[in-house]
Amino acid sequence: MHFFTPKAIQNLCQQYGLKPSRDYGQNYLLSLEPIEAMLKAAEIKKTDTIVEIGPGFGALTCGLADEAGKVIAFEIEKKIEKYWQEKTKEYPNVEIVWGNVLRMFCHFERGLKADEKSPSDAIDDNGDPPHSFGMTVGEPYKVVANIPYQITSPLIKLFLEDIKNKPELMVLMVQKEVAERICAKPGDMSVLAIAVQYFATPEIIIHVPRHFFYPIPEVDSAVIKITLKKFDKNQEENTKQFFKLVKTGFSSRRKILVKNLLPLVGGGSGLKKLQEIWEKLGYSRTIRAQELSVTDWIKLAQELAQSYPHTKKDEDVV
């Protein structure tokens, strides 16, 4: 496992002509403590395939390679390509995939080969179709990464919603405030918390202060573990309808939930029906969206589906 000092990072950046970029979220880990916590939380076996996003100079990557059978690491900063050409000789079970993971993973799951025409949203940042990489469609894997914080929401959406072959679990370094939002309890819920907790069980593993990174970011961080739930076919079919309800419920956080949901039930004419459902579920008439748990929302969705079975299913999930 590699441990970097600020001076070592500075020297590597200078050697490869790299100036740490906020656009790419390039803040390099200097402490072994969060790396060890991530490796332990991921419960890695020698047979595991690990997907990493943003390996940088490999502080986490090398630890993953020591424990896993295979590491597929997506990196967008091609200035360090020569660095990884040498480093992968030392770690032959590491494959660096150069490009945008948000585009390339969707391309991969569609089963397109490198020389096939790809849809416009599956083109890498240089305008070229991304090459294939060392995984098979449907292969079990885990995601373990110190991710660029600006892609936190789309990355979680990618692995929880957009692709069919979801990971067994994810262990991610994210902004502390985002980790707390994801793991929120009733009273502080949000669409993000509902979305993650609907698909998975999240937990905060360790808080990571900002001085554990170089350059020092403006925010503190946290490691979260997201363990995915198994869904049956019926649950998958109802997912879009469920999140249409949730997004409508959160459309105005200051309003009570009944008022936010009136547009879904025909306006004022549906108020009586909502009040009947509220009484059946034991909800206070003044309850707000952020006060309901995922289980509460599921029960509410089931009641509304029985009363209004023909509502359109036209919303994205996260």
Image (tube, rainbow, N blue to C red):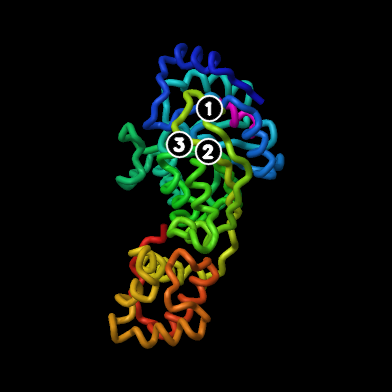
Q: Quadrant of the C terminus?
A: bottom left
Neighbour class for label 3 at 10 Å: few (<14), some, many (≥20)? Answer: some
Q: Pointer 1: what residue?
A: 213
Q: Considering only vertical position in the picture, is 86 above or below 209?
A: above
Q: Considering only vertical position in the picture, is 232 above or below 200?
A: below
Q: Earlier in the sequence, mark 2 or mark 3?
A: 3
Neighbour class for label 1 at 10 Å: few (<14), some, many (≥20)? Answer: many
Q: Nearer the viewer, residue 294 or 122?
A: 294
Element class at badge 1:
strand
Residue found at x 42% / y 31%: 76
Residue 312, image x, y percentages: 33, 74
Q: Pointer 2: what residue?
A: 221
Residue found at x 51% / y 53%: 182
Report the magenta residues as a range: 58-65
Q: Is residue 51 visible?
A: no
Q: Pointer 3: what residue?
A: 148
Q: Earlier in the sequence, mark 1 or mark 2?
A: 1
| Mark in the foreground, 1 or 3 | 1
Residue 207, image x, y percentages: 59, 40
| Label 1–label 2 contact, CB within 8 A | yes
Amino acid marked by disc 3: Pro
Amino acid marked by disc 2: Ser
Q: Nearer the viewer, residue 52 or 29?
A: 29
Neighbour class for label 2 at 10 Å: few (<14), some, many (≥20)? Answer: many
Residue 257, magenta (yes or no): no
